[in-house]
Image (tube, rainbow, N blue to C red):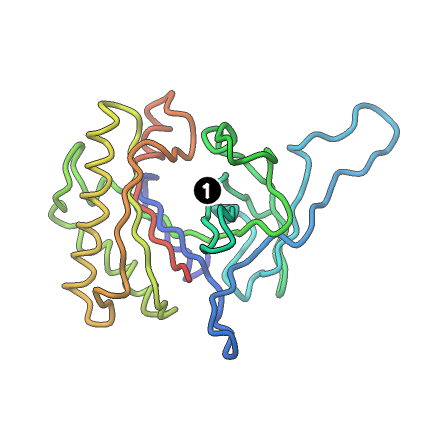
Amino acid sequence: MNRYFLRASGLGLVIAMSLGWVDPVAAQFQPPRILYVLNPPDTGVGPKGTLDDRRYYIDRGVEMSINKGNILNVYREKRLSPLVPPIRMFIGTMEITDSKPGSSVGKFIPSQAAMAHPMIRYKTAMVSDIVVPRLVIDSGVLFDPGDAALKTGATEEFDKVANFIELFTPSKLIIEGHTDSDGEAEANQVLSEQRAQRVVDYLIVEFDFISAGMVEARGYGEDQPLVPNDTPENKQLNRRIEALIWE
């Protein structure tokens, strides 16, 4: 585990960090993307490989802190109109199986909720999908169940987030709130928005290099689970905050 991929105990709070660089000419963020798909070889003996056997070649590697064993988020861009920028939809995660300078290879794990969405026609990762490294912190340190107030002791965890943000100096940071499916959907939506805003407020007040114009809070309630909400462990994974360095 390298010094940029900080992971505390627990699996509730996901900080997804989109690492890239700014083109000095275009001044536009360039996230890591899938460059091509590595299908399993057909040996002619036994059944052909399945989607689970595919590997995906990514155009960034260890220079972007993408390392073997890391779990990254995968997003697909969808353009609804030529007059507006494309939207980015979470479609699953990528487990990195190999990484070197300039490239990495991963195994895609689809999000069942995303694959069921009518806008996602191709039901696995594909060329040009965006791959986003992430930093994980235990959400139990931050919030009590059903509460949006920061717990005593949560400030120490935010120091890790702030140090990471300061290192990469992003111009835009989006804080997303997510819940599991327990309770009413409307209440979960409100809670996710409140928690995301609480994180934003704390970062702005406590760290001089994080300005109000740099950070935006968004809540998604129970609509974007990482895994099915069918066990206590999976529900803990889905109760999370994601901070995206996004341009």
Would you call the spot at circle 1 few (<14 residues within 10 Å), some (14-19), or many (20 or more)?
Answer: many
Quadrant hosting residue 102 = bottom right
Instruction: Examine the rendered structure and indicate whether residue 176 appears above or below residue 29.
Output: above
Instruction: Examine the rendered structure and indicate whether residue 155 appears above or below residue 120.
Output: below
- Residue 8, given in percent of the width and then of the height, sits at 32, 48
| Residue depicted at 18% across the width and 43% down the height | 194
Please name whichever residue, 39 or 67, is drawn nearer the observer in this view of the structure: 39
Give the side of residue 191 with respect to residue 50, left or right.
left
Quadrant hosting residue 67 = bottom right
| Residue depicted at 53% across the width and 52% down the height | 130
Please name whichever residue, 10 or 149, is drawn nearer the observer in this view of the structure: 149
- Residue 151, given in percent of the width and then of the height, sits at 13, 45
Q: Which residue is mark 1?
A: 90
Give the side of residue 236 with respect to residue 132, left or right.
left
- Residue 68, given in percent of the width and then of the height, sits at 56, 51
Residue lying farthest bottom?
24
Q: Tag 1's secondary structure?
A: strand
| Residue depicted at 33% across the width and 53% down the height | 243
